[in-house]
Amino acid sequence: MAALLADEFFLIAHEDRTGRSRLHPRATGLGLAGALLGELMVSDRVRAYEGDLYVVSREPTGDPLSHDVLDLLIAQPQHRELRTWLAFLAQDATVKVGERLLRAGVLEPVTRRKLMGTQTLYMPMNSNQRNVAAWAPIRLAEILVRRRPMNLSDRVLVGLVVATGLTRHVLWDFQAHRDALVHLPTIVSSLPEDLRQLVEHTEALVGSVLAAGRR
């Protein structure tokens, strides 16, 4: 069974040895929110038109988390703006996707003490789990470098990796990966219009988060 889009993004966005995010936590949340909506769009449950989301099928998705997101969209038809949904889902997307990976046996919860309380991270704790986590960016790099055919989910994953600033964690060697880096905009532009909107809105919101953090 192919890995789900948000699961793959989560594994790329987190250090496999420490469980820590490679991005600003809010940027990670936005990328995961984009991936969760991307799962619904790739599976033809949701479409985006001029920055708004529309449910086009209420058929169960087969995954509890993605269906929960679909149910939220169905229950709140008055809220259509893609940017609003990205910001809303980003609030707990890291926990939700982490829990899905926990149920799949890919990660385990680790609670750490902090000055102001505790923090729960989801991370690989044995060699098999670490191999799965470490493989996620390597797999995507292999596809990009070798120009292998990409399914729609992987093309969206590439778009979200670029949008959130994770590119250097996938294509880390500028010389060896130069051709793949140059090819990234072509992959993103090849996405269907509504999925391009998803990537563009995610990138814009991540940019706003990072700009606010520099003030």
Image (cartoon, helix red, strand yellow):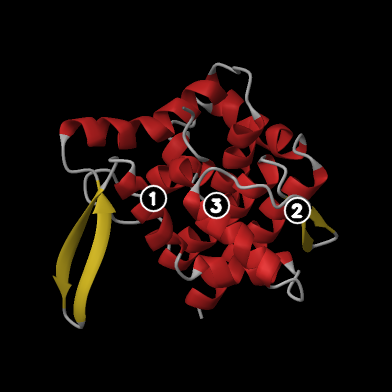
Name the foreground residue: 89 vs 201: 89
Whether residue 205 is visible, yes or no, is: no
Q: Is residue 198 left or right of residue 19?
A: right
CA–CA distance between discs 3 and 1?
Answer: 10 Å
Secondary structure of residue under mark 3: helix
Asked which secondary structure carries label 1, the reply is helix
Which residue is identified by label 3?
66
Q: Relative to residue 72, is residue 153 depicted above or below?
A: above
- Residue type at tag 1: Arg
Residue 130 position in % (x across, y down): 24, 36
Q: Position of residue 5 (x, y in %)?
A: 53, 42
Quarter-of-image position of residue 173? top left
Q: Amino acid at mark 2?
A: Gln
Instruction: Identify which amino acid the numbered label 3 is placed on.
Output: Ser
Relative placement, left or right, of 104 versus 79 is: left
Dot in front, 3 or 2: 3
Mark closer to the chain start, 3 or 2: 3
- For disc 3, the neighbor class at 10 Å (few under 14, some 14 to 19, many from 20) is many
Residue drawn 69% across and 60% down?
201
Contact (Cβ within 8 Å) of mark 1 with mark 2: no
Front residue (pair 70, 204) = 70
Judged from this view, the residue extending furthest toward the right is 50
Whole-percent x and y of residue 96? 42, 59
The residue sitting at 17% across, 32% down in the picture is 127
Residue pictured at 63% horizontal, 43% vertical: 159
The span from disc 1 to disc 2 (Cα, nearest Å) is 26 Å
- Asked if marks 3 and 1 touch (Cβ < 8 Å), the reply is no
Element assignment for label 2: helix
Kindly identify which residue carries mark 1. Answer: 100
Check disc 1: other Cα within 10 Å, few if <14, some if 14-19, many if 20+: some
Asked whether residue 186 is in view, the answer is: yes
- In the picture of the structure, the residue carrying the numbered disc 2 is 197
